């Protein structure tokens, strides 16, 4: 969400002011992560507060309207890069699709949106980012202090030098931008070389993203996302149902879809602002919800889905016709 500069400054000041802090309990964090209190204290002593990180938290790109957000990720260059990545690591992607049921183009889209296939993995020290947010940012202190402790545990497990690991302003790491807890729980040694490396090993990154998706409810062979014509439906009522909406309720309201949705599922209606001032509507199915487990923003999930569609088209054209033509700024549903 965007803020005026004065509000950013005020928010930043309040976030790092001593009286606004309630320090996390190191004993509890140590027990949670399975590390010693001394290890946590040593990490705290090494960390440096980064006010810029707190400022960035107040203006994430997810605060943009859809039509602006889309232009960041749905580009010809990103699609071509994604298709080239698909071709280069086709065997690993197809194996992951067989092993975990997650389409190769979805895995590619995640890696493309997150880091442009490892090109932009972040320049902040993860230690500083998690310390800043876990000990100096009250709105998310509970979550990030645990991730700080998880990072200490992860560094011990992988024998990393804590101060050398770089990532995003939120402490996400590697090609797939895994938080420490996800790295500990879902990162896998997919090429079986004896190391789990999400920073410069595309094979591990591919397998780990697929493993994460399967663990968070991805259902192989099911749909993801479909445009909706709301007609005369009570849109607010449908939106307010969140993930408790059913296809029966959607259709009973007068809304329609080109693809008939099976009734054995829960869905959610989303509204997306377009550049011409109108709104497009779509329903997300269970697999769209799984993408949102990776990043809770509907904008993010739609960007991943749309990019995956272009990737699949580009890959198929390249395989079948020896060429690729993409038009990412075409008409939106």
Image: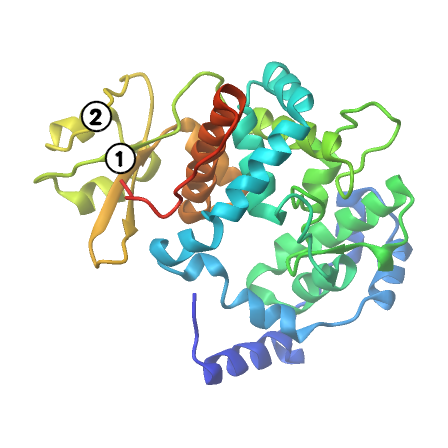
Question: Which residue is nearer to you in this view: 235 or 112?
Answer: 112
Residue picked out by circle 1: 227
Spot occupied by residue 251 in the image (x, y as percentages of width and height)? 16, 27
What residue is shown at x 74% (from left), y 54% (from top)?
Answer: 148
What residue is shown at x 65% (from left), y 61% (from top)?
Answer: 169
Spot occupied by residue 51 in the image (x, y as percentages of width and height)? 66, 75
What residue is shown at x 82% (from left), y 64% (from top)?
Answer: 44
Spot occupied by residue 327 in the image (x, y as percentages of width and height)? 39, 42
Quadrant of the rendering where the C terminus is positioned: top left
Is residue 107 toward the left or the right of residue 179 in the image? left
Residue picked out by circle 2: 258
Give the residue at the far bottom of this rendering.
6
180 above or below 84?
Answer: below
The quarter of the displayed image where residue 234 is located: top left
Q: Is residue 217 visible?
A: no
How busy is the neighbourhood of tag 1: few (under 14 within 10 Å), some, or many (20 plus)? some
Question: Which residue is nearer to you in this view: 75 or 109?
Answer: 75
Which of marks 1 and 2 precedes in the sequence?
1
Give the residue at the far left of this rendering.
232
Spot occupied by residue 303 in the image (x, y as percentages of width and height)? 44, 44
Determine which of the numbered discs, if any, sits on residue 330 in the image. none
Quadrant of the rendering where the N terminus is positioned: bottom left
Mark 2 touching mark 1, by CB under 8 A? yes
Is residue 239 toward the left or the right of residue 13 in the image? left
Tag 1 secondary structure: strand
Q: Is residue 281 visible?
A: yes
């Amino acid at each position: 969400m965007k803020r005026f500069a004065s509000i950013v400054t005020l928010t930043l000041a309040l976030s790092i002011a001593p009286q606004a802090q309630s320090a996390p309990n190191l004993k509890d964090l140590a027990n949670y992560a399975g590390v010693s209190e001394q290890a946590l204290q040593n990490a705290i002593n090494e960390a440096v507060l980064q006010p810029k990180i707190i400022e960035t938290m107040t203006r994430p790109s997810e605060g943009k309207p859809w039509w602006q957000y889309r232009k960041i990720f749905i580009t010809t260059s990103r699609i071509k890069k994604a298709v080239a990545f698909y071709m280069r690591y086709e065997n690993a992607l197809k194996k992951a699709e067989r092993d975990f049921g997650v389409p190769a183009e979805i895995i590619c889209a995640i890696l493309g949106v997150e880091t442009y296939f490892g090109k932009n993995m972040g320049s902040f020290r993860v230690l500083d980012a998690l310390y800043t947010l876990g000990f100096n940012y009250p709105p998310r202190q509970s979550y990030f202090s645990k991730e700080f402790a998880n990072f200490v545990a992860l560094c011990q497990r992988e024998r990393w030098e804590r101060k050398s690991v770089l990532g995003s302003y939120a402490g996400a790491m590697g090609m797939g931008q895994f938080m420490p807890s996800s790295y500990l729980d879902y990162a896998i040694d997919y090429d079986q070389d004896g190391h789990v490396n999400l920073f410069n090993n595309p094979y591990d990154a591919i397998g780990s993203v697929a493993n994460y998706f399967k663990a968070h409810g991805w259902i192989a062979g099911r749909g993801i996302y479909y445009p909706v014509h709301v007609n005369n439906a009570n849109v607010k009522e449908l939106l307010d149902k969140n993930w408790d909406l059913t296809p029966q309720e959607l259709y009973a309201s007068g809304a329609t879809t080109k693809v008939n949705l099976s009734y054995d599922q829960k869905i959610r209606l989303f509204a997306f602002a377009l550049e011409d001032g109108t709104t497009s509507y779509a329903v997300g199915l269970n697999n769209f919800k799984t993408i949102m487990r990776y990043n809770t923003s509907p904008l993010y999930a739609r960007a991943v889905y749309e990019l995956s569609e272009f990737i699949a088209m580009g890959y198929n054209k390249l395989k079948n016709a020896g060429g690729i033509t993409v038009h990412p700024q075409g008409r939106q549903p």
